[in-house]
Image (cartoon, coloured by chain):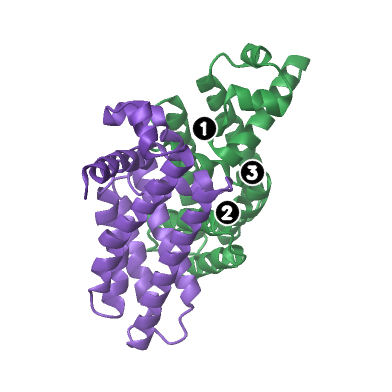
Chain colours: A green, B purple
Amino acid sequence: MGKGQETKRAIVDEALDLVSTGGLNGLSIGALARATGMSKSGLFAHFQSKEQLQLTVLHVATERFVDIVIAPALKQPRGEPRVRAMFENSMKQWESELPGGCIYYAVSAELDDQPGAARDFLIKTQLDYQDTIRRAAEIAVEEGHFRKNLDLDQFVFEFGSITSAYHYSGRLLGKPDAEMRALKAFDALLARSR
Amino acid sequence: MGKGQETKRAIVDEALDLVSTGGLNGLSIGALARATGMSKSGLFAHFQSKEQLQLTVLHVATERFVDIVIAPALKQPRGEPRVRAMFENSMKQWESELPGGCIYYAVSAELDDQPGAARDFLIKTQLDYQDTIRRAAEIAVEEGHFRKNLDLDQFVFEFGSITSAYHYSGRLLGKPDAEMRALKAFDALLARSR
């Protein structure tokens, strides 16, 4: 990376932390100037608009999500072990990577009624992620780990519901048993998929 | 209600719609002035601060939630019918009441890293709601509808996970099968609780 790219990367890292904590609404050029110690005009040299900054943050978040959650899971054996790795990586490694927890949880409710490029990009990444979970579960059926008549779309829905409740229960309500509840729900989901 | 109270109520109704769509960050005095056609100073006569406006909105939302979701469910027979009514009311009646859907979904991720009176109030209402679900499930155990060894806290966690995934799948991803998936997940939760 050249020096310009390095600087840009450092800015995006700060921006990701801001979004993780305060959502995209927390990502003003002013807040980013305070967090990086750069001037607003210096920041504008890297990002021409707030929308472009938002898109860059979501783009980098997706790259990180692939590196932290998806790629390590794809190295696990086909079938149930891979499905489990996706779940555990998304709950633990991904969650601990950012100060306010999962960036997708932080922005999903925020963007659902705000049409625009950021929302379109978020939806695409989420549909990609759901396809990846669905395919991993389908492989588990092919491997004989899950039953043949498993409703794959229902599996994806319930998989996502657990991580969502985990964020709500752990982050908002501050319940110490959130992780245990999520793991128990996931074990039960696997058990009834076999 | 006196005329002043009526005006205040009309303002809060507009404010609830704004929060449902854009979260608490969408609730600026400026946006509220545009939505109500009132002047900013006129609004400040009713709400001395943005924080007080936020609290009033959350307070009125809670009253509505009790009227729309909880009270009708408490009129259902003790046990499983009451548990089911809480779920269906929270998904359908409550969801259709507001233009951007459930206000709690809209503000939960937003407030989870923002300490303050609004967050404290939200957490209290959510813990109250969880207590109500928990007690309804406990009654279902007492009535013999649910099994004696049911893990009530786990039931509450999974109950909430379904509505959360319903919002994400229906509101953000725009999936037409979101309601069907949620009802199927809930039926399965009831089946394994019996």
- Can residue A126 be seen here? The reply is no
Between B26 and B37, the residue placed more toward the observer is B37
Horizontal placement of A81 versus A109: left or right?
right
Q: Amino acid at mark 2?
A: Arg
Residue A71 badge:
3
Q: Amino acid at mark 3?
A: Ala
Q: Secondary structure at mark 3?
A: helix
First along the sequence among labels 3 and 1: 1
Q: Quadrant of the N terminus of chain A?
A: top right
Q: Give the Cα distance between marks 3 and 1.
A: 30 Å
Q: Both on one chain, marks 3 and 2?
A: yes
Q: Give the Cα distance between marks 3 and 2.
A: 26 Å
Q: What residue sits 28% from the left and 31% below the top?
A: B36
User: What chain letter is assigned to the residue under label 3?
Assistant: A
Residue A25 badge:
1
Q: What residue sits 42% from the left and 45% below the top?
A: B106
Q: Both on one chain, marks 3 and 1?
A: yes
Crowdedness of circle 3 by 10 Å Cα count: few (<14), some, many (20+)? few
User: What chain letter is assigned to the residue under label 1?
Assistant: A
Name the outermost residue toward the right: A3
Q: Secondary structure at mark 2?
A: helix
Residue A77 percent coordinates (x, y): 63, 56
Q: Tell me the residue that label 2 is attached to.
A: A171
Q: Give the Cα distance between marks 2 and 1.
A: 18 Å
**Quarter residue A79 falls in:** bottom right
First along the sequence among labels 3 and 2: 3
Residue B2 percent coordinates (x, y): 22, 47
Question: Is residue B190 shown above or below B181?
Answer: below
Q: Amino acid at mark 1?
A: Asn
- Can residue B121 be seen here? The reply is yes
Crowdedness of circle 1 by 10 Å Cα count: few (<14), some, many (20+)? some
